[in-house]
Image (spheres, rainbow, N blue to C red):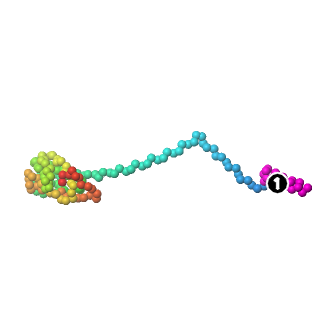
Amino acid sequence: MRFSFLTAVAAAALTAAACGSASPSAPSPSVTPSPSPAPAPAPAPAPAPAPTPSPTPSSQVTVSIIGQAGPGSFTPNPVNASVGSTVVWQNSDSTLHHIVLDNGTDVGNLNPGATSRAISVTSSAAVGFHCTIHPSMVGTINGSTPASSSPDPNAGY
């Protein structure tokens, strides 16, 4: 009988476990439906282009020839120009002039109303200039060095 009683208790315990128990059970996982069709992944943003260095702007200084008045023949005088910039002469006088730099650079003849070719400033040193036709007409170019520059190997002065 003892065997039957134990067997009956064990069978009851197994039946209770199989049908459910008094202890709480873990909730079954829920499944989230995926949208149909699946959305495409967002495209990766395009990389930003590398910045393009800005060229250093070159400036040009115009020297007006205003008459035969010694150092007052040119305006401005002295001429202040940065290394890398250019200087041109414009003949605002009614007479032919021929401008030469004291370092030998020949700017050339300038008829009334004409403008010379551009001369590059390649040095921070001062250089004089004059009219070969009217030797009392004199001036000076004062070069200045910008923060970062390199001389123009094809320069005239």
Depth check: 71 or 116 in front?
116
Rendered residue at 76%/56% (across/down): 23
- The residue that appears at 88% across and 55% down in the rendered structure is 3
- Quadrant where the image shows the C terminus: bottom left
Query: In x, y percent, where is residue 67?
Result: 11, 52
Residue 144 lies, with reference to residue 110, above or below; the image says below
**Can residue 73 be seen in the rendering of this structure?**
no
The stretch in magenta equals: 1-21
Residue drawn at point x = 20 percent, y = 52 percent: 155
Q: Which element type, helix, strand or loop, lies under badge 1?
A: helix
Quadrant the N terminus occupies: bottom right
- Reply yes or no: does residue 2 show up in magenta: yes
Q: Position of residue 4 (x, y in %)?
A: 89, 54
Q: Amino acid at mark 1?
A: Ala
Q: Going 51% across and 45% down the picture, which residue do you hit?
A: 42
Q: Residue furthest right?
A: 1
Front one among 120 and 132: 120
Say which quarter of the image contains residue 7: bottom right
Q: Is residue 44 visible?
A: yes
Tell me, yes or no, whether the highlighted magenta stretch contains residue 11. Answer: yes
Q: Residue under circle 1?
A: 13
In the picture as drawn, the residue positioned furthest to the front comes out as: 3
Figure check: 72 above or below 35: below
- Percent across and percent down for residue 107 are 15, 50
Q: Nearer the viewer, residue 17 or 94?
A: 17
**100 with respect to 151 (left or right):** left
